[in-house]
Amino acid sequence: MGTTFILFVSASIFSIGAVGFLIRKNPLVMFMCVELMLNAVNLVLVGYSNILQAMDGQVFALIIMTVAAAEVVVGLAIILTIFRTRHELNVDHIDVLKG
Amino acid sequence: MFDLIEKYWNAEWEPAMVFELFNQGLTLGVGFTAILAALGVVACSSPIYSALYLIGHMVCLALLFLLYNAEFIAAVQVVVYAGAVMILFLFIIALLGAKKEDLKLTDITFEKFLAGSFVGTLFCELLMTLAVGETRPPKGEITQEVLQQVGSAKAIGLTLFSKHLIPFELASALLLVATVGIICLAKFQIPKIRRRSE
């Protein structure tokens, strides 16, 4: 088991997140799919940190969590601003930056 | 796989072995539950169900982190991700209204085909890492016995504040920038713009 299981689960979650990011139209769900991809990377880091008996992987997972939290907060604020000006949430219709 | 089954078949059952088998089975079950929850996030048409599946997924990952001897990361995962981030998501969904997206997963458009083929290639490339196997034996200092003595949080803290101080400070700068960005987005009035289609 060991590394094989970690890599398989992580690759599956990352791919599911990537396909969700590409096919979904709702920006909130797209953000959730980005979270899935970040979580997949965290899983590899923590699993390998356990196997290689070093703490660096867990430290990096912690920093990834910080980045994800900041990214989600800014992204949701942007989505809220777009919704206030346009009154719809479909990424296919939001194709110009200028109003 | 088969030699593993044979090993367990012929073995004499001792408590340590039963515990190891239970541990492996639990890891397998939790891992596949995490994959299924991730599928649920993508396949649900209502964003509120997607958010709930994502919470389940994150709890599964926290359990996996616990099984990999990372208690502190598991706690942070539950508090920060399943707590703070997902609550924020649910608030925003409640604020914007959870409108259902008519998600036709069965009829394949050209875009979906393109996305599927791209991600399929990506998945195959990621699976190629499985073929490599272990290249060097583990020789770190933080073995399981050390971890049980000092605890996961202290071990992380020692590494974070000695070896990785600069990334830590950069993360604090990132949080500050995010805070300033949020205030800018929330405070300044955005002029109403014409809707393009009308």
Image (cartoon, rainbow, N blue to C red):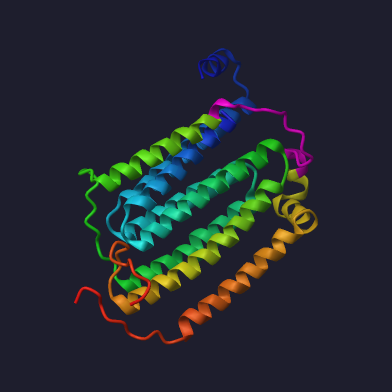
Would you say residue B132 sits in the magenta stretch? yes
Left or right: B192 with respect to B123?
left
Q: Quadrant of residue B33?
A: top left
The C terminus of chain B is located in which quarter?
A: bottom left
Left or right: A13 with respect to B138?
left
Q: Is residue A68 above or below residue A61?
A: below
- Total labels drawn: 0
Q: Is residue A49 above or below residue B17?
A: below
Of the pair B27 and B136, the residue shown nearer to us? B136
Of the pair B147 and B157, the residue shown nearer to us? B157
Left or right: B7 with respect to B109?
right
Span highlighted in magenta in the image: B130-146
Of the pair B89 and B153, the residue shown nearer to us? B89
Does any portion of residue B79 appear in the rendered image? no
Query: Residue at the spot x=60%, y=30% of the render?
Result: B20
Query: Residue at the spot x=21%, y=56% of the render?
Result: B102
Does any portion of residue B88 appear in the rendered image? yes
- Assign the magenta stretch its main secondary structure: loop
Would you say residue B43 sits in the magenta stretch? no
Q: Is residue A3 above or below residue B37?
A: above
Q: Quadrant of residue B24?
A: top right
The image shows residue B9 at horizontal and vertical percentages of 53, 15
The image shows residue A78 at horizontal and vertical percentages of 43, 72
Query: Residue at the spot x=37%, y=58% of the render?
Result: A29
Query: Residue at the spot x=70%, y=59% of the render?
Result: B167
The image shows residue B126 at horizontal and vertical percentages of 50, 36
The image shows residue A32 at horizontal and vertical percentages of 42, 57
